[in-house]
Every structure is written in C-alpha cells, then in structure tokens.
Amino acid sequence: MAVSSLVLGDEEVTFSAQFSGQSMGIVIPVEAILAVYAKENGQGMLFPAEEAKPNNEPPDDEPQPPKPGKRPSLKVVK
C-alpha cells in the first residue's frame, strides 16, 4: 500500500512513494540494499555486505574542480 510501480530488477529497485503528500520516484541500486523485511510479520532476510575495493584513482567521468580564480558560469542551451 505504501508504494506503487514496484520493479525489482537485477541492477536496481524502482518504485513510487509519497512523502509529505508529494509522489516521488525512487531508484535504489541493488548493491545498496542490506536487508528486506515484511512489515506484516517481521520476517525477512539479510544480504551479505560486500567490502568496497579501494580505488586510489579518480574515475574518468568525475567532473574536475574549477581552476582557482575562474568563476563558474552558466550557458543558455536552446
């Protein structure tokens, strides 16, 4: 009753829920889910926590911080 459009996928779980009367779409990566429990009877299951692999190199798609002295600017796209 609390959620609608629930989709349990291999990569993510998606659903719609209402917060303060406003409907919002929620997307949760499967890796972020630690446990699932039923409210009705308290039964559920825990998932094993996987340790994150250390990565000292920043990802290529991460935006670089602006150079000192340059102000950020916006560009109109039509």
Image: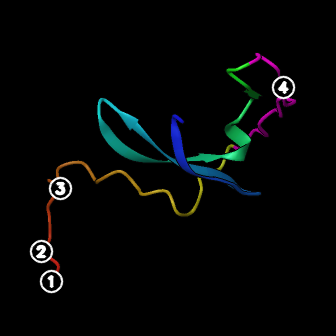
Mark 1 touching mark 2, by CB under 8 A?
yes
Among the two numbered marks 1 and 3 on one chain, the one whose residue lies closer to the N terminus = 3
**What range is drawn magenta here?**
41-55
Q: Nearer the viewer, mark 1 or mark 3?
A: 1
Q: Residues within 10 Å of mark 3 (few under 14, many from 20)?
A: few
Q: Name the residue under label 3.
A: 72
Q: In the rendering, at what x and y percent does residue 38 appear?
A: 73, 25
Q: Mark 4 points at which residue?
A: 46
Among the two numbered marks 2 and 4 on one chain, the one whose residue lies closer to the N terminus = 4
Corner quadrant of residue 50: top right
Check disc 2 and give the amino acid type: Val
Helix, strand or loop for disc 3 = loop
Spatial distance from mark 3 to mark 4, Cα to Cα? 45 Å
Helix, strand or loop for disc 4 = strand
Q: Which residue is the extreme one toward the bottom?
A: 78
Spatial distance from mark 1 to mark 3, Cα to Cα? 20 Å
Q: Nearer the viewer, residue 76 or 58?
A: 76
Check disc 1 and give the amino acid type: Lys
Helix, strand or loop for disc 1 = loop
Corner quadrant of residue 35: top right
Classify residue 67 as left or right of residue 61: left
Q: Mark 2 points at which residue?
A: 76
The label shown at residue 78 is 1
Spatial distance from mark 1 to mark 2, Cα to Cα? 7 Å
